[in-house]
Image (cartoon, helix red, strand yellow):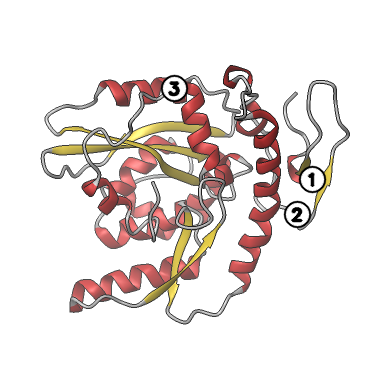
Amino acid sequence: MPAAARWLLLAVAALLAPAGASAEMPTVNSMALRMLDGEALYTAAGGLKPVSDGFWQARFPADQVTSPEVDAARAALAALPLGPDLDAGVYVFAKPFGGQRTASAFVAHKPSLSALIARRWDAFGPLGVTPATRPQQVMEAIDRAPPAARWRAFGLAFGYPDYAVDFFVAAGEEQAATGQFVARDFLSLPTFASDRGRFVYAVPKGHAERDEDRQLKAATAPIFAAYAAWRQAYVGDGKATAQVPWGDWLALPTVAATAPATPHCEPSRPTRPPCAVPRRLSRLRR
């Protein structure tokens, strides 16, 4: 779901999206591609983003608890070859609009999310979640929180720097009190689907890049380069989608959340075309 400010516009985009916003019935392959082509790549590849969501959405009548599309999305996500660190599902926004409810797909890196909740207990404890809470319940608890608590918890869960989350919450509270929009800039990190508007966060107007911003750039760059090379090898151009080894990205071994600054190349294998991958991703599942 492209958006200028990912966690600010999460609810707004959902409210404005037409019913049946997803044009196709979700499948295992379509959900895997939506996930990895967007910012969820940085969740799958070691939990740099503890959670990513919105790579698939649908709307259905508010008097229903689900729909065929939502059921299909849940089934497709359940069938993905996820490693033990990942959990994926669909949660439904608590607040309906125009007689419709919005469902959104998410993927969570469980170790990163648990560590975040423990580190930022001030933000997550009041929501009734713990490091052991299932990601589905965490997302639902955040969605149902009061505005400022919701903004803070979603921003942290989506992997934005603490200072950026603090700014966004303060700006939201100021706007609520004064009715005046607080000017801001946005920083974006690239995804295959779009260079901008996916992994994006708000910063003060005239913001000078900080160490946290540079660290995120350094961490995402080798992951993005490795995925782009892998995608070219396996996806599109007449290649058989059924044979795509999604587990290469969705079943990675547990690794640290910070990527190295430089990639390296693995030797080519008869069953794998050669491609550059960052060192932290070199132990892809065979």
Dot 2 amino acid type: Pro
Please identify the quarter of the rendering in which residue 236 is found.
top right
Name which residue lies at 38% across and 45% down.
129
Q: Front-most of 53 and 137?
A: 53
Residue underneath mark 2? 260
Mark 1 and mark 2 in contact (Cβ < 8 Å)? yes
Q: Specify whether residue 253 is in view.
A: no
Placement of the C terminus among the 4 image quadrants:
top right
| 180 horizontally vs 167: left or right | left
Q: Mark 3: give few (<14), some (14-19) or many (20+) Cα within 10 Å.
A: some
Name which residue lies at 51% across and 44% down.
38
Q: CA distance from mark 2 to mark 1?
A: 7 Å
Residue 232 lies, with reference to residue 207, above or below; the image says above
Residue underneath mark 3? 27
| 200 horizontally vs 66: left or right | right
Q: Earlier in the sequence, mark 2 or mark 3?
A: 3
Q: CA distance from mark 3 to mark 1?
A: 31 Å
Secondary-structure class at tag 3: loop
Mark 3 and mark 2 in contact (Cβ < 8 Å)? no
Image coordinates for residue 263, horizontal then vertical, percent: 79, 50
Residue underneath mark 1? 279
Q: Specify whether residue 252 is in view.
A: yes
Secondary-structure class at tag 2: loop
Name which residue lies at 45% across and 63% down.
201
| 103 horizontally vs 269: left or right | left
Q: Mark 2: give few (<14), some (14-19) or many (20+) Cα within 10 Å.
A: some
Image coordinates for residue 57, horizontal then vertical, percent: 33, 37
Please identify the quarter of the rendering in which residue 19 is found.
top left
Name which residue lies at 25% across and 44% down.
17
Q: Earlier in the sequence, mark 2 or mark 1?
A: 2
Q: Front-most of 268 and 95?
A: 268
Secondary-structure class at tag 1: helix
